[in-house]
Amino acid sequence: MSDGALSQDEIDALLAGVDSSSMGSPPAPAASAGGEEDRKALQAFLAGTVDAQSSNLSMMTGKDVAFRGPNVVPMTREDILQQLPDMVTAVKADFNSGFPGEHSFLFAEDTARAIAALMNKEENIQLDEMAMSVLGEVVSQLVGSQITALSDKTANKSIASVSPEAANVPKAVVALPGGTFMCATYQLTLGDGRSHQLWEVYGAQPAADISQALIGRSGGGARAAAGTAFAGMDMGAMPNLGAMGSLGPSAGPAMPAMGAMGAPVNMGGMGQSSVQSVQFPSLMPGAAVQEQGNIGLIMDVFMEMTVELGRTRKLIKEILGMGEGTIIELDKLAGEPVDILVNHKLIAKGEVVVIDENFGVRVTEIVSPMERMTDSLG
């Protein structure tokens, strides 16, 4: 950003990644992503998926794509920022069930552009909203393959992730997990003779839970599966478990007798269940306050505003044949409002006026969000 201006993607990242409610509050305790055994388990699992990932991406791009690796290591935010280029395309794909927690993919800007160009069969592609949508679909396929393999290996059928969201932003504003997390670094070839890097980030909790489930220890996913199985049992149909005490010491401690309705007569040393009231979220418009606090951080940032008179498409031979006096017919009729764009995105329409021998534009209409989306996709 040589002129000090922020792009729309950078502004979106700032608005999404800064929580004004957390300003001034003490930092959360650092989380741990697990030990060496956990790291090896996660690396072995991911290495077993690279062939499927290569095949999927080859089918999507029509090129011979190959994944190599990965190398999985525990990292902190400072560690990974030293490896990333100045601009990255970050795709958030958090797990929301099974092994819930933070999960994302990071591409260098040129890698993201190369993948989007292959997907769209278009050269010199810009990393606009359409390209971000394409990269989100690529990550969706990658995550889908991982979830299928992980479900088979851990017998956890509840694993799911949110719909991936991509943004091209400076590395300083990338949303990363706190504390120590697991980072898998892949080498990627896209049939262009170049080697690209791809980073996959797992938050401390999902990394530890996945690793523990893979090596057979009771992680978060195993606990969730066991809880589901226990909840599905008909307690009233269970036999009197008090007789289990006659099986001898090898059978473990005797269980209490169950009442007619399956309720324990005496829980003994097992303790009592803790019942808590449900805590509902506040319906007060707190999000609006947070949003105002976030946007206040960028109120003095310059943005490029352009007034567009009209557009047209010409053949190369027609453009080369232009000279002084050539008249170019545009797609707007005389008297039609001109388009007002901010960072190349349509936000309003207006009419041309003259102010002290200078051209100006009077705003006549603010474009609705739906029209803005239609314009960007068109």
Image (tube, rainbow, N blue to C red):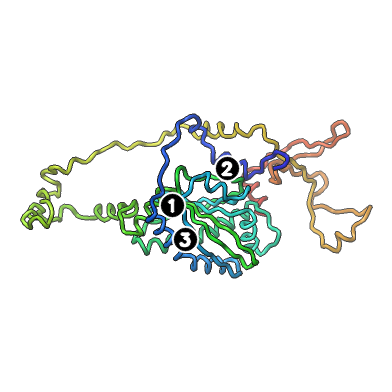
Q: CA distance from mark 1 to mark 2?
A: 21 Å
- Say few, some or many: other residues with alpha carbon within 10 Å of mark 2 (under 14 / 14 to 19 / 20 or more): some
Residue for badge 1 = 95
- The three-letter amino acid code for the residue at tag 3 is Gly
Identify the residue shown where x is 59% and y is 51%.
Answer: 89
User: Can you say whether 136 is above or below 364 in the image?
Assistant: below
Quadrant assignment, res 353: top right
Give the numbered dot on residue 231: none
User: Can you say whether 210 is above or below 364 in the image?
Assistant: below
Q: Are marks 1 and 2 in contact (CB under 8 Å)?
A: no
- The three-letter amino acid code for the residue at tag 2 is Val
Secondary element at image label 2: helix
Secondary element at image label 1: strand
Which callout, 2 or 3, points to the residue nearer the camera?
2
Residue for badge 2 = 173
- The three-letter amino acid code for the residue at tag 1 is Phe
Give the numbered dot on residue 144: 3
| Total tally of numbered discs in the picture | 3
Label located before the other in sequence (1 or 2): 1
Image spot of residue 85 (x, y percent): 61, 50
Identify the residue shown where x is 44% and y is 66%.
Answer: 48
Image spot of residue 283 (x, y percent): 43, 34
Quadrant assignment, res 158: bottom left
Please indicate whether residue 77 sits to the left or right of residue 235 in the image: right
Secondary element at image label 3: helix
Q: Are marks 2 and 3 in contact (CB under 8 Å)?
A: no
